[in-house]
Amino acid sequence: MVEELQDPRRTEPSFVLDERAMLEGWLEFHRVTLMMKCEGLGDVERKSRPIATSTLSLHGLLRHMAEVERSWFRRALLSDSDAPYFWINATTDAMVDDSEIFPLDDANWEDDLATWYGACDASREAAKDKNLDFTGSRGGNPVSLRWIYSHMIEEYARHNGHADIIRELVDGSVGA
């Protein structure tokens, strides 16, 4: 049986809310879930890749979600061309997709956690005065804030599933 993660920071949205509050509530729920999956571990455990065929780690997932937050809320919604947090090769200045996930040899947890928190704050700020029909652009295609919220909930939910498995393999902890 899976035990629930109990924490006052993590609350499931009410069953009856307007659309905006529902979307924002579920996104916050999943943000906090990822953070909780990373808590209580040391650097080695957070960087651990316990699935031999995968480059995923808890630390890498948090960095990845910082990039996803930036990409959808800043780049797509606001057409902001700010530089990636982690996708830059320090030697060549070139973007390298998924380099936020692996390798993590020089990654600093406190710095990366602060980056993720900042990315989440920037996402909230980017969306706060926009209605759900506000449209940005992704790859030349229109994308609504409603779609971005739905995608972000899906993205976090999928990666929180990964985090569940990784955390259980790292230290035996389970919970939704």
Image: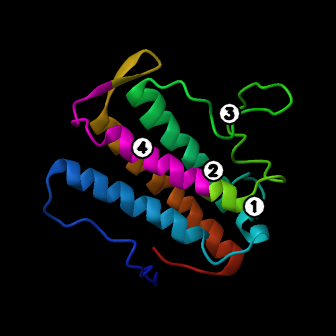
Name which residue lies at 63% across and 75% down: 168
Q: Position of residue 134 (x, y in %)?
A: 25, 29
Separation of marks 3 and 2 at Cα, in angstroms:
12 Å
Residue 97's label in the rendered image is 3
**Can you identify the residue that label 4 sits on?**
123
Residue 49's label in the rendered image is 1
Q: Position of residue 66 (x, y in %)?
A: 56, 47
Amino acid marked by disc 1:
Arg
**Magenta span has 117?**
yes
**Can you identify the residue that label 2 sits on?**
63
Residue numbers of the magenta segment: 114-135
**Mark 1: few/some/many CA within 10 Å (<14, 14-19, 20+):** many
Q: Nearer the viewer, mark 1 or mark 2?
A: 2
Amino acid marked by disc 3:
Asp
Separation of marks 1 and 4 at Cα, in angstroms:
28 Å
Name which residue lies at 62% across and 30% down: 83
Of the residues under marks 1 and 2, which one precedes in the sequence? 1
Above or below, 170 against 129 in this view is: below
